[in-house]
Amino acid sequence: MGLSPSIVKAIKEIGFEQPMPVQEKVIPLLLANAADIIALAQTGTGKTAAFGLPLVELTDTSTRNTQAVVLCPTRELCIQITKDLLSYAKYSGSLKILPVYGGSSIENQLRELKKGIHIIVATPGRLIDMMERGAAKLNNVHTVVLDEADEMLNMGFLDSINAILSGIPNERQTLLFSATMPPAIASIAAKYMNNPIEITVGTKNAGAENVTHSYYLVQAKDKYRVLKRIADFEPGIYGIIFCRTRRETQEIASKLVQDGYNADALHGDLSQGQRDSVMQKFRDRNVQLLVATDVAARGLDVDDLTHVIHYSIADDAGIYTHRSGRTGRAGKAGISVSIVNLKEKHQFQQIEKKIKREFVPAKVPTGREICGKQLFHWVEKIENVNTDHKQIEAWLPEIQTKLESLDKEELIHRVVALEFNRFLEDYRNSQDITEAVSENRNSRRDDFSDTKDGMVTPGYTRLFINLGKMDGMYPEQLIDLVNQSTPGKKVPLGKIDLAKQFSFFEVENRHTEKLMSALNQAKFHARKVHVELAQEKTPGESRDAEKPRFREYDKPRSREYDKPRSRDYDKPKTREHAFAGSRDNEAPKKKKHRKGPKY
């Protein structure tokens, strides 16, 4: 393709063998210094190498001037692109490449820029800052790359991009790489690009070809249970779970960790150091499931993801396309799974039409199927385990002596039980989750509560607790309270129904008495906890019918309730009487004016 031997040597070490379609089309044009280029291709199709290899090839290292700028939406992608470019330039002499992004030391970046940098990889906000300080001198730049351009526009960087491009000489080559082609991208092309060549790999605005799309249509209350079953049914899962809000992201990650999964959260409230730590653990596979918001996960470049799970449906087709593009990268197969409730069904169908992909309905795995899948996965691990460990040979005689009383079948039973106690405990009495059916539109039922019909899960007892949303009580806090009150024990909870001043929750029958005893001695935010059996109610009756009668523990929380009511309010009379003596009928009082300026 016209690349120098030093670059060919570097990419062979990386493992590149054949160029991908976007690289075949873009690299020759860039090496020939052709016109501006718009390249539309999904994430994971080799776009970084498509512009990165020619940048490394064409940069003159004999001068200290900045010759190329790469703009990208996030810190993580900025760091990843820099690492890739440095790997391409391994044998290309003294090529200097610097990532410039917010959240890291600006003094270090200023110091490096003063030394002279050939290629700057930057987020728009920090690069604007460097330009205003006079540290980033872009008057000799001949190439500008806008990577993940649609994502930068979604994040509100349009003004910053306009300012940066206005500060770079017009005699430049502009390269725009994007997964989708929204109108704002077209406006940038019309304003700053000169007769650009448009290259489309695959179908415009469509998802990657090698990603399969499936969905589970369930009740909203079952979403987390479905998420757990997806993770349990795929023993080797390595994926990202997308949520809509930071709070939901943290709650789902916390629940997964409590339930024994290797999970962590990535959202905007984390500092740069925390984000780097989470991402490093995820890349090292110490974290198996990363729960993230769209903003935090934009531009993430992680290899070999098996799944992308949409816990919250994307707001539009473009966001869904970017989410799904985190998997199925570099020609590998990937799976995009959506957990859809009834209210999201129409929105989901609109996304399906726009991306022109068939979404396959999936059946939620049963407990029996999950246990079987996990068991045989574990058996395969036993078959393929490396037994060449001479260090353990010294202990083998003693181990054999301890286990010689067990026959083969008993030994297998015990080993299996040791490995699968968690799954057996979770799924022994669990009910299968069925596909949701359309509800009556006139129903005012809350999708997040399945207890208003009075039905209690078989094998569980329904309890009343004198804490509600006004007290800061949410599912995560209730689970924490139960865990703190029963240290060392795993107490399975069922349905949770939160109200303003009280709540209901289910607990397995065998744990009911001990849990009630423990919670009745506990405190939550200095408030005494009271738990008792919920009263039975008939279907259709208000959940207030389950609430026990007023007790000492249910005193009003606000002092406003303790004030005696005015007698005037208790004696409604004529309109004239009601307003007699009111401020409206009083003589207006003269305002007292203070001398001096008004504040």
Image (cartoon, grey):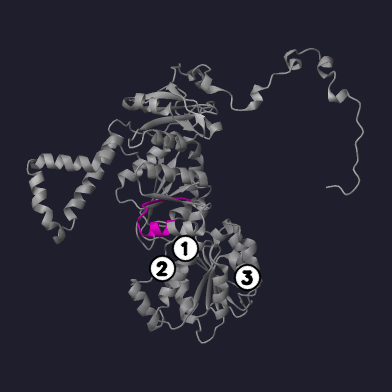
Q: Which one is nearer the viewer's eye here, 102 or 305?
A: 102
Q: Identify the residue at image location x=49%, y=39%.
A: 344
For mark 3, what is the residue? 165
> For residue 267: magenta?
no
Q: Report the residue at 61% width, 75% height from top.
A: 135
Q: Is residue 317 above or below residue 193?
A: above
Residue labelled with disc 1: 41
Within-10-Å neighbours for mark 3: few <14, some 14–19, many 20+: some
Residue displayed at 52% across by 76% down: 119
Disc 3 versus disc 2: nearer the observer:
3
Label 3 sits on a secondary structure element that is helix
Q: Which residues are magenta?
A: 278-292
Mark 2, Cα crowd under 10 Å, few <14 / some 14-19 / many 20+, is some
Q: Position of residue 572 (x, y in %)?
A: 76, 13
Q: Compare marks 1 and 3 and give the one earlier in the sequence.
A: 1
Gap in angstroms between the C-alphas marked 2 and 1: 9 Å
Can you identify the residue that label 2 sits on?
21
Q: Alpha-carbon distance for marks 3 and 2?
A: 28 Å
Residue type (three-letter) at the residue carrying disc 2: Pro
The amino acid type found where label 3 is placed reads Leu
